[in-house]
Image (tube, coloured by chain):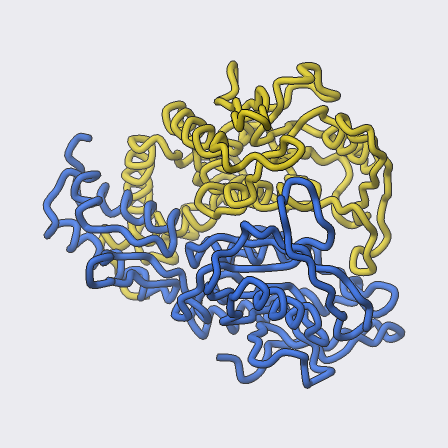
Chain colours: A yellow, B blue
């Protein structure tokens, strides 16, 4: 590769970091790629770290030791998280979103790539210090959120299904009781999906009773894995005691008045 | 915001582009954010465009007219696409992946964030000129691929389900026949999901007979929409005549010999 100017190196480095969040790069790999000395790369990275931290959107972390190097951590600072929670609360409380049965239509929000990326950044901020090995979710609505979170944490995504399929291979099947509807459902996960003794982060779009999360805890046990974190976009205020503890939620749903067309939803209080 | 140096501006701009691929930014929005003149921003963007194009990983496109501005298009050049296709072929042809019935275990590949992002970049390169309004997929295995493609094209993702749920609201339900197994299945899509007269890109992990793709074509018709493109990770060589035409695939599966443990898979020939 021809020798690059500092400006071009910074552009290239910033792009590499953004496209492989969470991935550890050695300085050596950059000197080769960019054709310059370690000290120059090191200065370039300082500039990128400063710009990132000024924006409140992330940092470049330096890891020491044998597997050392640098990695980009996408973050959402307090102000950005608050603004996002307020924006989403306003959007989701529009009266036109109320569906029969007091449900809220939110597919357009939880499938919108930019919104999902912003929320994933919040989850990443909460959990990047937890040494997560996998992000796990249950099909279908939480998949985009879980995928972005896995991408930001640079770990594989695992999707639990409701039915077995031939392309899964041998699988573990458990039954669980939905916390709110008391309906019995199945969770199926391919045996090859998880390495034993892994730390899992469960991500979902919505938590009411916490039955699904409790099912994931049980499923994790069958794989000798531990659920090290739970992150949901919305949890309901009631029941206040969920079947699982210490879940993080960005938003809290206080209630939906179908008749009056009023949804009461807001940023969760006392978040991490 | 305090005045930034060129290096810092380039770092900030590159990050903004990478985090909002496909999104159109006016130069004015940057001059405000970075506190500098339009001419400086313009020069910064030239540097970023050059570095991007040298890497073969994308470009910054300038759009003229009333809704004009600049946007980042993530691309995968011929060489990168070839390398990716070869790497995936080698990985997926490992004998340990063969499942009973001649299926291939590939969940670890199609749920791996970095791999999925690389494949999404290929789909983006193929279809970014097609004025796509939505990326559409059918649950579950193609969702990560479809999500990344939607993110790179900066359009909403739409997920078709097999069963109706209360959180969808009113929905359209069609039956379709799986092209290979001749099984009748349902597709359900919320009525609110698509605006009429939109152009859809159908993304999936696997195509054998093309029955699912044909179902999407029919579903699109119910919404007065048009399927403007079809992209799959793998298509099978047989049947060579699919139920739909002009699909793009990165890989072609020629056959699986369960007894001998041999999978024959390679980069698709004659790709766009």
Residue A6 position within the rendered picture, expressed as x and y whole percent measured from the top left: 23, 51
Q: B254 above or below A266? A: below
Using the rendered image of the protein, determine whether residue B68 is visible from the camera's viewpoint: yes
Name which quarter of the figure residue B236 lies in: bottom right
Using the rendered image of the protein, determine whether residue B90 is visible from the camera's viewpoint: no
Name which quarter of the figure residue A147 lies in: top right
Q: Quadrant of the N terminus of chain B?
A: top left
Q: Residue at x 82, y 28 (%)?
A: A182
Q: B196 above or below B268? A: above
Left or right, B65 with reference to B52:
left
Residue A27 position within the rendered picture, expressed as x and y whole percent measured from the top left: 41, 46
Residue B78 position within the rendered picture, expressed as x and y whole percent measured from the top left: 45, 74
Q: B22 above or below B233? A: above
Q: Residue at x 28, y 41 (%)?
A: A43
Q: Nearer the viewer, residue B240 or A168?
A: B240
Q: Residue at x 46, y 71 (%)?
A: B126
Q: B132 above or below A83? A: below
């Amino acid at each position: 590769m021809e020798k690059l100017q500092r400006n071009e190196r910074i552009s290239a480095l910033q792009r590499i970091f953004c496209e492989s969040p969470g991935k550890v790069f050695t300085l050596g790999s950059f000197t080769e790629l960019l054709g310059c000395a370690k000290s120059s790369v090191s200065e370039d990275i300082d500039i990128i770290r400063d710009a990132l931290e000024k924006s409140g959107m992330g940092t470049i972390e330096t890891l020491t030791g044998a597997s050392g190097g640098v990695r980009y951590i996408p973050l959402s600072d307090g102000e950005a998280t608050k603004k996002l929670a307020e924006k989403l609360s306003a959007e989701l409380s529009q009266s036109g979103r109320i569906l029969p049965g007091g449900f809220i239509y939110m597919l357009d929000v939880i499938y919108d790539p930019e919104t999902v990326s912003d929320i994933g950044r919040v989850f990443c901020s909460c959990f990047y210090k937890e040494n997560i090995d996998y992000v796990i979710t249950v099909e279908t609505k939480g998949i985009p959120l879980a995928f972005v979170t896995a991408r930001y944490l640079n770990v594989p995504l695992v999707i639990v299904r409701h039915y077995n399929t031939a392309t899964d291979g041998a699988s573990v099947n458990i039954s669980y009781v939905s916390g709110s509807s008391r309906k019995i459902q199945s969770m199926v996960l391919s045996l090859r999906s998880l390495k034993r003794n892994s730390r899992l982060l469960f991500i979902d779009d919505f938590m009411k009773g916490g039955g699904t999360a409790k099912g994931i805890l049980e499923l994790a046990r069958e794989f000798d894995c531990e659920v090290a974190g739970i992150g949901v976009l919305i949890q309901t205020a009631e029941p206040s005691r969920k079947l699982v503890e210490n879940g993080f939620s960005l938003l809290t749903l206080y209630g939906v008045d179908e008749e009056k067309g009023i949804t009461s939803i807001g940023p969760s209080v006392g978040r991490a």
